[in-house]
Amino acid sequence: DAKTTQPPSMDCAEGRAANLPCNHSTISGNEYVYWYRQIHSQGPQYIIHGLKNNETNEMASLIITEDRKSSTLILPHATLRDTAVYYCIVRVTEYGNKLVFGAGTILRVKS
Amino acid sequence: DTGVSQDPRHKITKRGQNVTFRCDPISEHNRLYWYRQTLGQGPEFLTYFQNEAQLEKSRLLSDRFSAERPKGSFSTLEIQRTEQGDSAMYLCASALRGALETQYFGPGTRLLVL
């Protein structure tokens, strides 16, 4: 699976949009971009995934660049409960495929 | 609650003891994964099952570790002769095999080996 690069930490004001970047310059054509987050002492929580089109669900939006070498996870109105470690993962999904987690980005939402 | 459940949530044991953890996946999910997470790190893959078959094991899974999923439903992870280095959070995830497989995680079992 392709390697991802994320900033180690970010701060965001409560109520503002949180934009979390991820670089995956070696991504292959059949690899999806997945985002998970992990709130302190809990298991990782699935957020969203995409291949090449932008995606939106009730939690977040995922913007993938046209060349697919980077993406941004957007939390439109961050709350204190969004404080967590956010992991960007790229993987092929056709197979029983383990998730390879990096260090992620610690997002701190501040009031 | 229809999510992934794990039991126990916390376990403290003495070095050399055996421990067993249980994971109950989301109903009808045929894939089940085990991960381990140490402090400050992302989760690391240990092993996974498709139904009752164990299809992949990480090099992290030493001979002291064994996992089973006897009827393709719940799974157990046993650690024999625990060592202090086994102290970690053990996470279970389940998924439904398909083209867009998404893994859903349980709350984890936190193990402390004294």
Image (spheres, helix red, strand yellow):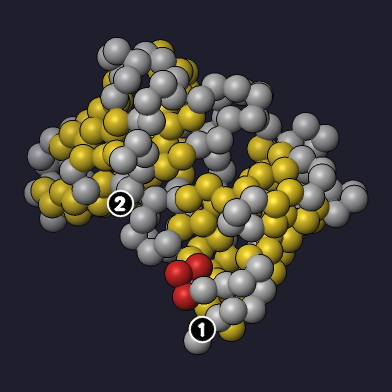
**Left or right for B25, reference B77:** right
- Residue B89 seen in this snapshot: yes
**Left or right for B24, reference A25:** left
How packed is label 2: few (under 14 Cα within 10 Å), some, or many (20 or more)? some
In the rendering, which numbered label is found on residue B9?
Answer: none
How packed is label 1: few (under 14 Cα within 10 Å), some, or many (20 or more)? some
Disc 2 or disc 1, which is closer to the eye?
1
Which residue does the image show at 31% across and 47% down from the upper left?
B108
Instruction: Say if B57 sits above or below A21 in the image.
Output: above
Observer-nearest residue: B42 or B113?
A: B42
Residue B33 location, x and y as percent?
42, 32
Q: Judging from the image, what secondary structure is the residue with disc 1 in?
A: strand
Q: Amino acid at mark 1?
A: Lys
CB-based contact (under 8 Å), mark 2 and mark 1: no
Label 2: which residue? Answer: B88
Label 1: which residue? Answer: A110
Which residue does the image show at 37% across and 25% down from the upper left?
B27
Mark 2–mark 1 Cα distance, whole angstroms, equals 29 Å
Which residue does the image show at 51% across and 83% down from the upper left?
A110
Q: Judging from the image, what secondary structure is the residue with disc 2 in?
A: strand
Figure quadrant of the N terminus of chain A: top right
Q: Using the rendered view, name the quadrant where residue B53 is placed.
A: top left
